[in-house]
Image (spheres, rainbow, N blue to C red):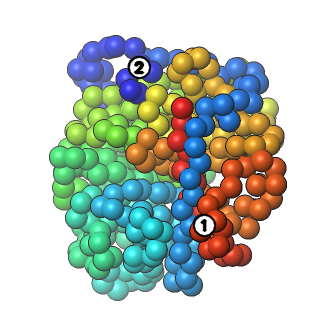
Amino acid sequence: MIERIFLVLSLCALAACSSRPDEQVACDRTLTFGEEPSPSIPDRIRQVDFLPLEFSEAARFRNADKLRFRNGLIYLGDFGSRKLIAYDSLGRVSFVIDRHGRGPGEYLEMKSFTVDDRNVYIVDNATRRVLLYDCQTGAFRESRPLPVVAWDIEALYNGDFVLAFSPLNGGALSAAQPNYRLFVTDSVFAVKRGMFGFDSGYNEPIGRPAYFSICGDSLVYSSFWFDGFTVLDRRDAVGFRHVAIDFARGIPAKYRQDPDAVLNGPYRYLVAVPVLCGDYVAVDVCCGEYLDTCLYDPETDCFVGNSAKGVYLFPPLASDKGRLVSLLAGSSYANLVAEGFPRASAAVERQLDENSMLLVFYTLK
């Protein structure tokens, strides 16, 4: 499966040097992103399925910043609205966590969330807490101290957690913390170790809504640290592999921390954490003045892009059961079908209205 993407290496040797603040990225594999990927994503898609998400005022959201499948539910986080919505497998609202405030079970910020087989965990950097809610009902359980400022969080199989942090241009923390990009904590969020150090004064020009994605037993991490991604083991986050993406028009090293050069230049770079699905790697790429979703195909060892019409791969939010998962506004559905996008079933179409949102599931060949 995804291991075919990587070269064989000693994970123990990597782990031994992973905590040095002056660490250089030693990538285990480089994927080449050509000048213009061929518009052949439709050739890689076998089937498209749709799941309408039930609409209600309580469950209204603006953005899907993070999507997770677990416990037979679909958890969607809209961080700008400070809201988490859980849907069942039929797309019906199961519960909503929308508790902005300073009281018990309330939070000032929803920076990210994760879920295990017992709890939903919401990160509130404003109060330096992680709030725990029942994963089946959304009922508040307790809060725990957050040891560091974190932009994202994921739960490991062994009960530990991984927190992601990146120093961002123009921002400053109110209190110092160790210079690591990842922190592995125990079940009560006591830090066990830091990973991927950085020098004081280092800043990244662009942040992301989410820094983690999941594919099976693999936890995928990516930031503006380098053009590529890191795959960690969800059992304990000890073993990892770095995979670089070599862009034909990548950002020159001297502009790497310059937000004006990055945002206004003609360069290509990742704008979201890649989503792995089997042997495929889906990436959202800035290509000068526009964004595009591309797909790495290991059979041809190249990236392919969308075509102007027909089956179109929207930016994936997650992968689930071997399928890439994206979000589509129902209001766009009719126009897309007119341009050759696959039709949903008649039962799905009967559910569509101006408020509809659809999860789109792509089965790849």
Real-space Cα distance between discs 2 and 1?
37 Å
Q: Nearer the viewer, mark 2 or mark 1?
A: 1
Q: Residue at x 18, y 55 (%)?
A: 187
Q: Going by the picture, which residue comes out furthest to the front?
A: 346
Asked whether, in this view, residue 156 is left or right of residue 65, the answer is left
Q: Which mark is residue 348?
A: 1
Residue at point 29%, 35% (across, down):
233
Quarter of the view holding residue 74: bottom left
- Judge by depth and name the residue closer to the eye, 208 or 180: 208
* x and y percentages locating residue 160 in the rendered image: 21, 49
Q: Which quadrant is home to the N terminus?
A: top left
Q: Total marks drawn? A: 2
Can I make out residue 81 in this image? no
On the image, the x and y values in percent for residue 308 come to: 81, 40
Q: Is residue 285 above or below residue 15?
A: below
Which numbered disc, 2 or 1, marks the residue that appears first in the sequence? Answer: 2
The three-letter amino acid code for the residue at tag 2 is Arg
Q: Nearer the viewer, residue 315 or 255?
A: 315
Tell me the quarter of the picture where residue 194 sits: top left
Estimate how packed mark 2 is, as few (under 14), some (14 to 19) or many (20 or more) residues with alpha carbons within 10 Å.
Answer: few
Left/right of residue 333 with respect to residue 66 in the rendered view: right
Give the structural element (helix, strand or loop) at label 2. Answer: helix
In the rendered image, the vertical position of residue 267 relative to residue 75, given as above or below? above
Categorize mark 1 by other alpha carbons within 10 Å: few (<14), some (14-19), many (20+). Answer: some
Tell me the amino acid under the disc marked 1: Val
Quadrant placement of the C terminus: top right
- x, y (%) of residue 10? 27, 15
Return the residue nearer the eye: 327 or 144.
327
Label 1 residue SS: helix
Residue wearing tag 2: 4
**Residue at position x 49%, y 57% from top?**
66
